[in-house]
Amino acid sequence: MCSGIHAIPSGPGEFPEAVYSFVICDKLNVMIDAGVANSVMDVGFLDKLDYVVVTHLHVDHVGALSEIVQRYKSKVIVYNGYSKYLKDPRKINSDARSVLGELVDIYGEVQPTEATFLEVNGGETIDLGEKKMEILYTPGHAKHHISALIDNIVYTGDSAGGRYNGVPIPTTPPPLELNKYIKSLKLQIGLKPRAVGLAHGGLTSPLHLEEHLNQILSKRFKANLDIGGMAEEILNKHLEVNYKALEEALAKENIELD
């Protein structure tokens, strides 16, 4: 029987920390995001998993979903209208190839998921036992993006950047809606969480949220991250895509600063 909070590297063998999945144990256990298909995620400590929250439908967040659901018969929480893309993930895979190219071969393609889907709009509260989980609608990175607040820890998916070596990085691939991204980030800052669970970076201080917002508004968001080897190549590919989309959005959009 599991207890506590677990931040689990769920990226590929070449870079396990590329993605983190989070397991929060209670009377009902919940996982936030399901990593890549070629994941090295170790969930051997889990005897049951009641819910999987899909923050958004990108290959590095739903790749292992089908396998996890088959094993645990978990219910899947996803934004309203989007479970159909998990049942038939051809669009998820093709969109990923158009943005990430050969990285999809490292991550693996998403397989169809058959599950009990709970479609949400944001604002829902789910009782886990001692704790409650609140679903937040946090668009910008994707129009179907949701986050989860549990025990005053906000699990942000890709709605609030990432963090490696203590440095915040943007999670802003196309098609980016920057004003909505900033609004979602400010929403999560306003929660005053005690910690933040980043899909790309793990558990970190809530100060990350302000740092990430400031790096966007100041247009000083490029980072020099020396993590070495294949991991650095994978991260740099993501950053190249994210920087380009963010630069284009900053040039085109009238950023709302209030």
Image (cartoon, rainbow, N blue to C red):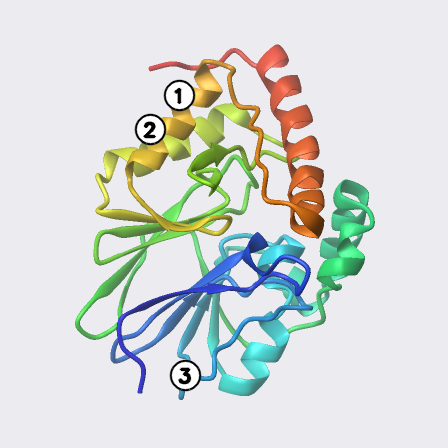
> On the image, which quarter does residue 32 sit in?
bottom left
Residue type, label 3: Phe
Task: Estimate the x, y position of residue 50 in percent, counting from the top left.
Answer: 40, 78
Question: Looking at this view, is 229 or 54 the one in front?
Answer: 229
Residue occupied by mark 2 = 210
Q: On the picture, is 191 further left or further right than 29?
A: left
Q: Amino acid at mark 1?
A: Asn
- Location of residue 130 by image quarter: bottom left
Q: SS of the residue at dot 3?
A: loop
Q: Amino acid at mark 2?
A: Glu
Whether residue 114 can be seen here:
no
Image quadrant holding the C terminus, namely: top left
Query: Alpha carbon of mark 1 to alpha carbon of mark 2: how far?
Result: 6 Å
139 left or right, relative to 6: right
Please name the residue shown 71% across and 44% down the image. Answer: 233
In whole angstroms, how far apart are the C-alphas of marks 3 and 1?
A: 38 Å
Please tell me whether mark 2 sits on a helix, a strand or a loop.
Answer: helix
Residue depicted at x 64% and y 45%: 228
**In the image, which disc is placed on residue 214?**
1
Q: Residue at x 69, y 32 (%)?
A: 240
- Reply above or below: 7 against 172: below
Question: Can residue 56 be seen by looking at this rendering?
Answer: yes
In front: 233, or 44? 233
Q: Tell me which corner region of the image, top left, top right, bottom left or bottom right, holds residue 24.
A: bottom left
Q: Residue 195: image x %, image y %? A: 27, 48
Question: Disc count in the image?
Answer: 3
Residue carrying label 3:
45
Contact? badges 1 and 2 (CB < 8 Å): yes
